[in-house]
Amino acid sequence: MGERMGDTEREAAAAVDAELIVRWHRGEDRAATLLVDRHAQALARFAASQGEREGVEELVQDTFIRAFQALDSFRADSSLRTWLFTICKRLILDRKRADRRQQGKVELEEGHAVVNFDALDGLVADETAARVRGAMEQLSPLQREVFTLRVTEGMAYGDIAEVVGSTEGACRVHYHNAMRAVKEYLSDDD
Amino acid sequence: MMTDCEAGDIRDLLPEYAHDRLAPAVRDQVAAHVAGCEPCQAELALIGAVRSSLAAQVPTLDTRAIAARVIAIPRRPARRSWVERRWQFAAAASALLMVGVSYAVLGRGGSGMPGVDSTPPRIEAPSGGNGASTGGSTLASNLPAASAQASARLELSFGGGLADLSDEQLTRLLSEIDSFKATPMLDPDEAALLSSLDTVARGGAR
Ligand SMILES: [Zn+2]
């Protein structure tokens, strides 16, 4: 017997998203505004955690545009937010590939995309934040995705698995490995 | 050097505990454990530090501008989307499960959820709805009044009525939904842990 509140709440949140989608189709512009308000900041956090700094807003906007253009392919048995994260993650990958091509760098394996955290230097003045950034930098891209979705969004392993294209069990392992690596990094730093 | 807590199942719940996404009974059990466990306190502090460090890197978005771009996207003529119909079927299919969840919530005499209005909007099932939604309303109205929250969510879960909400009602509903966060599905390990926690809770707190 489930003891968490989650399932009914998630159904309720999904109901609101579904209703807003219907209203948008009906021509109610305000529905789109509400949908953007409900999910934009979480997408921005995810993008920033993956090393995106320049054009986070553009990335979030592109995510919504892709999503709204493809609403017919959205399956209601997935949560809208999870689906939006999935689209956002794809766009981030596309950008990294395009950046690499532009910079004439050796094409790296998708799983080992380099994240340029140096761009954040001027923004992260706080020492704790800088140390956390250093800790995040040494994670693999997959570990970083799983870790940040869990820590900054409190997402369930099942939803994380959907976003990163893995399994719940694997995501649990990635999370705990990432946590261990972050702890080790921070204690070595002392 | 931070050591790991040996209560791995509790440790696994710390991110959701930090986001206040656990049912009250589980949340209280985690809180009781954390109060006496230094490794978990340290891990929780780390989760908080990572969360705020990353949040500090995020620019504030101009959501109006984003919405304006979205609104400019051509859309189909008005129709009831299959997404909603499909969703209603799914809701009907899980009706019995949800009644069970609601009773579990009520059965623990839940202390109520933080930040939630105690008188949520009543959502009437649409007349001429399908059999499942009529049945759902009946079930919902039979629930004790002690948890208006749970019954509102139950009614909500049968859908249909949402379409007829006024903007004011919808806005209120949205803020209510946002005040309780989405939480994850259980996997078997967690289900076992949680049911044992619940046994402890029943034996102890009552
Ligand atoms: Zn512990």
Image (cartoon, coloured by chain):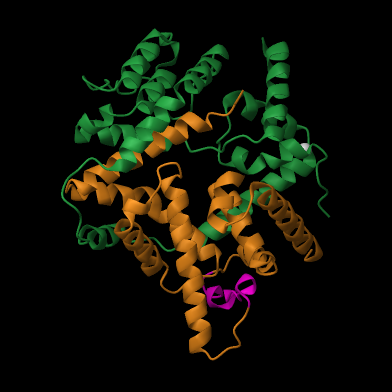
Chain colours: A orange, B green
Q: Residue at x 32, y 32 (%)?
A: B173
Residue B48 position in % (x across, y down):
61, 49
Residue B169 position in % (x across, y down):
24, 30
Q: Is residue A117 magenta?
A: yes
Q: Is residue A16 magenta?
A: no
Residue A4 position in % (x across, y down):
57, 29
Is residue B20 in sight in this rendering? yes
The mark total stands at 0
Q: Quadrant of the C terminus of chain A?
A: bottom right
Q: Quadrant of residue B87?
A: top left
State whether residue B161 is above or below residue B10. Answer: above
Q: Is residue A18 left or right of residue A79?
A: left
Is residue A15 in sight in this rendering? no
Q: Quadrant of the N terminus of chain A?
A: top right
State whether residue B58 is above or below residue B86. Answer: below
Query: Which portion, as a residue range, is magenta?
Result: A109-123
Q: Quadrant of residue A127?
A: bottom right
Q: Is residue A86 left or right of residue A189?
A: left
Figure quadrant, ligand 1: top right
Q: Residue at x 53, y 29 (%)?
A: A5
Q: Could you say which is closer to the camera, residue B131 or residue B103?
A: B131
Q: Is residue A48 left or right of residue B158?
A: right
Q: Residue at x 58, y 32 (%)?
A: B22
Q: Could you say which is closer to the camera, residue B140 or residue B148?
A: B140
State whether residue A59 is above or below residue B194. Answer: below
